[in-house]
Image (spheres, rainbow, N blue to C red):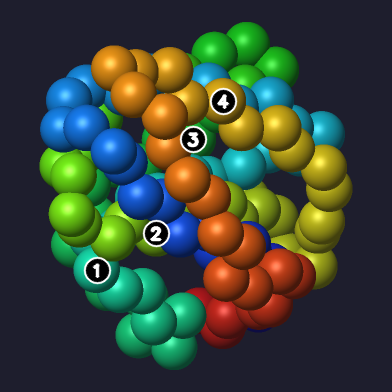
Amino acid sequence: MNYYFEAIEINVLETGCYDIINNSTFNAYAYIYKDNFDSKTHPSIFLLKDDSSLQGYQFQSTVRLQNGIIYLFIMTTNETNKTGLFSLHFIGPAEISFRLISKLFFFHF
């Protein structure tokens, strides 16, 4: 089965707790991994996992992030062969830099 995902590198300027708010046009899963993510092995160790915890296709979570560590935010679909749009907002003690790593790749389960 094919599940599409987007990977976004996150760097924080200040250690602290950050609220993450997402709105999407599809039922999504969101993960934050520390240091790396391999879509072929899909490791079970992650800092955050959320599955549309708010109404509709939205979620909100809080995660503690540290300065100097690279994090990967992975947004993936709940359904096979599905894609859609999403917005992502981080609210915390300092600015965050984002870098798109990959877009619309897929992995198999």
Specify the amino acid type for callout 2: Leu
| Image quadrant in which you'd find residue 58 | top right
Of pointers 3 and 4, the one earlier in the residue sequence: 3
In the picture, the quarter occupied by the N terminus is bottom right
Q: Amino acid at mark 3?
A: Asp
Q: Label 4, on which residue?
A: 89
Rounded to the nearest whole Å, what is the CA distance between mark 1 and mark 3?
22 Å
Please, what is the three-letter code of the amino acid marked with disc 1? Asp
Can residue 79 be seen here? The reply is yes
Q: Secondary structure at mark 1?
A: loop
Query: Mark 1 touching mark 2, by CB under 8 A?
Result: yes
Front residue of 72 and 84: 72
Q: Nearer the viewer, residue 102 or 92?
A: 92
Q: Earlier in the sequence, mark 1 or mark 3?
A: 1
Q: Amino acid at mark 4?
A: His
**Residue 81, image x and y in percent?**
80, 67
